Amino acid sequence: MEDISQRSLKITRKYQASAELLWKVLTTPEYIKEWWGPDGFTNSIRLMDVREGGKWEFTMRGPDGTEFENEYVYQTIVPLKKIVLEHLKNPKFTIIITIEDIGNATRVEWCNVFDSVPTKEEAVRAFKADIGLEQNLEKLGKFLKSQF
């Protein structure tokens, strides 16, 4: 089996929320647009077809007004357990989100797997992908606390 650790960014978090609630905020446009992305970014979702082979298309707008077009295709959907999304634009990467019910909380493992080590390094250098992933999961936690 291939070692993808050198071309991946991986974070694990525990949230005081049910797996059902986490699934809902990961798969509902009205919720995900409120927390997705690094600090200061907003989202306009055009399409979110959560099924294997379905697409998710949206625009992220940075604090300076720069717009980033995003297009993903859902590779794997295991309700309440796992989502795998392939980012179709550059930089090329796959998001693997695993959800695990651990009693009174839910563990989320989030892994961004880039197509190569240079792609990961460029995403970190140019887009601060490592910091953005941390901020994304912090925003998810804040959203869960403030909305539910």
Image (tube, rainbow, N blue to C red):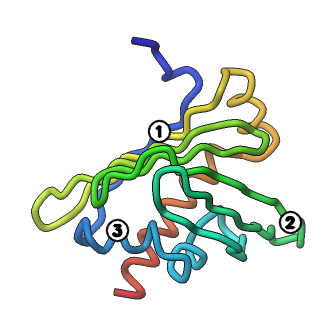
Q: Earlier in the sequence, mark 3 or mark 1?
A: 1
Residue 17: image location, x then y, percent: 26, 72
- The residue labelled by disc 2 is 67
The image quarter containing residue 63 is bottom right
Residue 8: image location, x then y, percent: 55, 30
- On the question of residue 10 being in view, the answer is yes
Residue 97: image location, x then y, percent: 41, 49
Residue plotted at (64% across, 52% down): 72
Residue plotted at (69% across, 63% down): 57
- Front residue (pair 84, 116): 84
Residue most extreme to the bottom:
147
Q: Nearer the viewer, mark 3 or mark 1?
A: 3
Residue 115: image location, x then y, percent: 65, 26
User: Under tag 1, what secondary structure?
Assistant: strand
Q: Nearer the viewer, mark 1 or mark 2?
A: 2
**Which quarter shows the N terminus?**
top left
Give left or right: position of 114 versus 46: left
In this rendering, the answer to whether 63 lies above or below 145 is: above
Q: Residues within 10 Å of mark 2 (few under 14, many from 20)?
A: some
- The residue labelled by disc 3 is 22
- Front residue (pair 44, 62): 44
- The residue labelled by disc 1 is 10
Residue plotted at (71% across, 74% down): 46
Q: Residues within 10 Å of mark 1 (few under 14, many from 20)?
A: some
Report the Cα–Cα distance between label 1 and label 2: 25 Å
